[in-house]
Image (cartoon, rainbow, N blue to C red):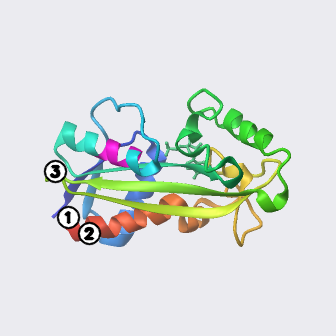
Amino acid sequence: MTVRVLLASRNKGKLVELRRILDAALGEHAVALVGPPYPEAPETGLTFADNALDKAREGVKHTGLPTVADDSGLAVAALNGMPGVFSARWAGRHGDDEANLRLVLGQLGGVADEHRGAAFVCAAALALPDGREHVVEGRVDGALIREPRGENGFGYDPILVPDGETRTTAELPSEEKDAISHRGKAFRALAEIIAAELT
Ligand code: IMP
């Protein structure tokens, strides 16, 4: 039997990634992922988990389907965890990746190498029609370099070198990034919960 699950995101990359992880974890066709048939509300929470849960609840409210949602971003130690939930609009305009990355690099201009720790963090939530909820978090720790490198990925990928790596996440092929990424970890953990709850 195929279970229908809503992924409360219009981001095609996330849909593809989650589908790949669910198929690997649960077998093909165990879960049919559908996109949101309603306009999504703006993110207003102050934590990744709150935003992921809000979006998952909104999906259940609109469709009655079990709903998965996520929220992610860059947490910089020297900036007390910011940009955090403001990662997509750090420079003021939503989704201006280049301006966001340049602003972070400027803010860290005088920060020594040993204090340039940062992590990509992802919270992934599942809300069920009966009101039960789950939220899990994945992270990849690393350090911020001073000049962007690499063409893959998006957002802050060109400036984060994961611990144990010499390449930025924009220099990793996507399968290698998925294997260690915050979103890969959170989605894989959520896939196990979906398996236990829905299949
Ligand atoms: P959202 O989870 O789609 O809202 O992502 C928020 C923002 O966090 C993105 O616009 C990026 O700036 C940043 N971000 C999230 N995940 C990644 C990643 O894997 N690489 C680089 N930047 C990321």
Q: Residues within 10 Å of mark 1 (few under 14, many from 20)?
A: some
Give residue 129's mark.
Answer: 3
Left/right of residue 67 with respect to residue 75 in the rendered view: left
Question: In which quadrant is the N terminus drawn?
Answer: bottom left
Callout 3 secondary element: loop
Q: Residues within 10 Å of mark 2 (few under 14, many from 20)?
A: some
Q: CA distance from mark 1 to mark 3?
A: 12 Å
Q: Nearer the viewer, residue 92 or 148?
A: 92
Residue 151 in view: no
Q: Nearer the viewer, residue 51 or 168?
A: 51
Residue in view at x 86 percent, y 46 percent: 110
| Residue 55 image position (x, y, % from top left) | 34, 42
- The disc labelled 3 sits on which kind of residue? Pro
Q: Which residues are magenta?
A: 51-56
Pointer 1 with pointer 2, Cβ within 8 A: yes
Residue in view at x 21 percent, y 44 percent: 60
Callout 1 secondary element: helix
Q: Quick one: which residue is furthest to the front in this view?
A: 80
| Residue 86 image position (x, y, % from top left) | 55, 38
> Which residue in the protein does label 1 denote?
198
| Residue 187 image position (x, y, % from top left) | 41, 61
Q: CA distance from mark 1 to mark 2?
A: 6 Å
* Vertical arrangement, residue 148 with respect to residue 97, above or below: below
* Vertical arrangement, residue 57 with respect to residue 190, above or below: above
Give residue 195's mark.
Answer: 2
Left/right of residue 146 with respect to residue 87 in the rendered view: right
- The disc labelled 1 sits on which kind of residue? Leu
